[in-house]
């Protein structure tokens, strides 16, 4: 039993740096998603829909823009244009 506990403690100690890195990346994605959500809301509030740049303010769009940045906005606009043909 003490051997299993020692092995478990060693495994946890080895996994902590990897988890810290993954949680840091997840936190950065969450921060970028919140910023993207604000950007999408600002785009909608400024009346960009009149120019044909209408995008919904939702979690999927915010995650796409948060993960891909400006190319994500282009991708979403292209998908919106393709589905409205």
Image: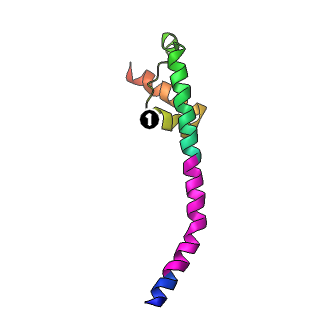
Q: Bounds of the magenta span? A: 8-27
Identify which residue is drawn at 53% across, 38% down. Answer: 33
Give coordinates of residue 67: x percent, y percent. Answer: 55, 41
The quadrant holding residue 20 is bottom right
Q: Position of residue 3 (x, y in %)?
A: 48, 89
Q: Locate the C terminus by quadrant.
A: top left
Residue toward you, 69 or 1: 1
Q: Quadrant of the N terminus?
A: bottom left
Secondary-structure class at tag 1: helix
| Residue position marked by numbered label 1 in the rendering | 59
- State the residue lying farthest toward the top: 50
Residue 56: image location, x then y, percent: 44, 24
Q: Is residue 72 visible?
A: no
Residue density around tag 1, few if under 14, some if 14–19, many if 20 or more, within 10 Å: some
Going 48% across and 14% down the picture, which residue do you hit?
49
Reply yes or no: does residue 85 show up in magenta.
no
Main SS category, magenta section: helix
Percent across and percent down for residue 32 are 58, 39
């Amino acid at each position: 039993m003490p051997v299993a506990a020692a092995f478990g403690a060693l495994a946890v100690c080895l996994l902590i740096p990897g988890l810290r890195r993954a949680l840091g990346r997840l936190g950065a994605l969450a921060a970028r998603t919140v910023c993207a959500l604000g950007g999408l809301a600002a785009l909608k509030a400024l009346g960009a829909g009149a120019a044909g740049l209408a995008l919904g303010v939702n979690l999927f769009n915010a995650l796409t823009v948060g993960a891909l940045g400006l190319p994500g906005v282009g991708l979403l606009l292209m998908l919106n244009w393709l589905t409205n043909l």
